[in-house]
Amino acid sequence: MNKKSIVIALIFGILILVLPAVFYFFTGSSEESALPEPNIPTQTKTVNGITITLLNATYNNSELQIGYEIKGGGQSENDLGYTFYNQGEPFAETVSGDLLKLGDKHYYITTRTDQVRDLPETLNLTFEIKARPNSAEQHNISIPFELVLEKETS
């Protein structure tokens, strides 16, 4: 191989390695753009270094879904639990959901329950997030949010 071929091969090698890195770091979406647009007036609370912003809520005949941003740790750092109340009476504790990692100890979490049978058209909801930063303790952090939701028609 002559010197010209070696230089061309090196240039191609560098392009193959550098271009993906450039696209990854400069054309990727920012962490905040991964958050969905709020569909309710946002509420933010900070307790023991955990900041939660309630962003989304939907309520229909089949489920109730809440979406929130959490900074300061998610499920793996805080063993999160949930309770849903209507006019002060609990109606659901067991929920399913999704977790979107946005950064270090920064997540968007969606919780949902299908335990909505026999609930009124207008729900006076208290959504309580319970956190347990230390696995040896009970859920010792309680972060309640209150909102009124109208049942959506499907």
Image (cartoon, rainbow, N blue to C red):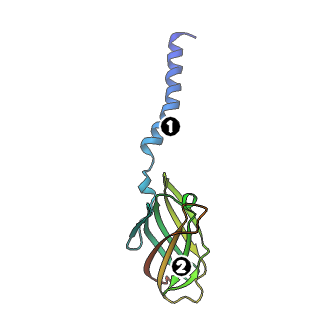
In the rendered image, the vertical position of residue 149 relative to residue 13, given as above or below: below
Using residue 94 as the reference point, say whether residue 56 is left or right of it.
left
The front one of 135 and 61 is 135
Identified by mark 2, the residue type is Phe
Q: Secondary structure at mark 2?
A: strand
Q: Amino acid at mark 1?
A: Pro
Q: Residue at x 58, y 58 (%)?
A: 76
Measured from the top left, where is residue 135 in percent x and y? 60, 61
Up/down of 109 relative to 101, above or below: below
Task: Residue at 46%, 75% (x, y): give it.
Answer: 144
Identify residue for label 2.
84
Q: What quarter of the picture does the N terminus occupy?
A: top right
Compute the Cα span from label 2 to label 1: 45 Å
Residue 150 is labelled as none
Q: In the image, which is nearer the foreground, mark 2 or mark 1?
A: 2
Which of these two is toward me, 100 or 106? Answer: 106
Frontmost residue, 15 versus 40: 40
Residue 127, position as x, y percentages in the image: 49, 76
Q: Residues within 10 Å of mark 1 (few under 14, many from 20)?
A: few
Q: Tag 1, which secondary structure?
A: helix
Image position, residue 40 (x, y; %): 40, 74
Q: State the residue position of label 1.
A: 20
